[in-house]
Image: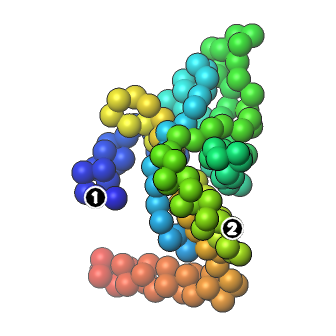
Amino acid sequence: MNKAEELKRKKSPVQIKNKKAGFEYFFIEEYTAGIVLTGTEIKSIRAGKASLVDTYCLIINGELWVKGMNIAPYFYGSYNNHEMKRDRKLLLNRREINKLLSATKQTGYTIVPLLLFIDENGRAKLDIALCKGKKAFDKRETLKEKEARREMDRMFKK
């Protein structure tokens, strides 16, 4: 990801993060995928009513799907409101999907959503990453590093 893409993400009015992913996994490769949504789903996302807690991605029949993503029903939606936790299709190139498929066949690798945002054209995008799970000692090491950084920030602010 280059600096121009990072700036676009920071300017996005909606940024829904999966905070737990950084603690649970090592990120190996990151991708940005489009999402196939219905009418009221995009309205709920623009209102910030979505969650990436306990979400994961699967490749089924050569297509990438996100499972467990919660998008709350749109408040002003009527009888045609959407389901909260339905499976949603992600849009990636065939080459990228094949690369992810071969990587996830190895033990310990998975695909995890990291960030849901709105791009400059008003479309919802999802940053996903090929991840390897952390062991318990890796998680303890991450906590130690985080605590050390926090302590350093306290020392320099005084």
Which of the numbered marks, if any, corresponds to residue 72? Answer: none
The amino acid marked with disc number 1 is Asn
How crowded is the residue under tag 2: few (<14 C-alpha within 10 Å), some, or many (20+)? few
Q: Amino acid at mark 2?
A: Lys
Q: Residue sitting at 43 percent across and 36 percent down? A: 118
**Can you tell which quarter of the image residue 12 is in?**
top left
> Within 10 Å of the Cα at label 1, are there few (<14), some (14-19), or many (20+) other Cα atoms?
few
Q: Secondary structure at mark 1?
A: loop
Left or right of 38, for residue 151 = left
**What percent of the width, then of the height, locates residue 4?**
24, 51
What residue lies at 57% left-to-right and 87% top-to-bottom? 141
Report the residue marked by disc 1: 2
Q: How many marks?
A: 2
Between 40 and 74, the one lying in front of the other is 40
Q: Position of residue 156 (x, y in %)?
A: 29, 82
The label nearer to you, 2 versus 1, is: 2
Please say whether residue 86 is visible from this viewpoint: yes
Which residue carries the number 2 mark?
105
Q: Position of residue 49 (x, y in %)?
A: 60, 35
Q: Earlier in the sequence, mark 2 or mark 1?
A: 1
> Residue shown at 57%/41% (left/top)?
90
- Cα gap from disc 2 to disc 1, whole angstroms: 29 Å
In the image: residue 23, left or right of residue 61? left
Q: Residue furthest top?
A: 79
Front residue of 47/5: it is 5
Q: Is residue 66 above or below residue 109?
A: above
Element marked by disc 2: loop
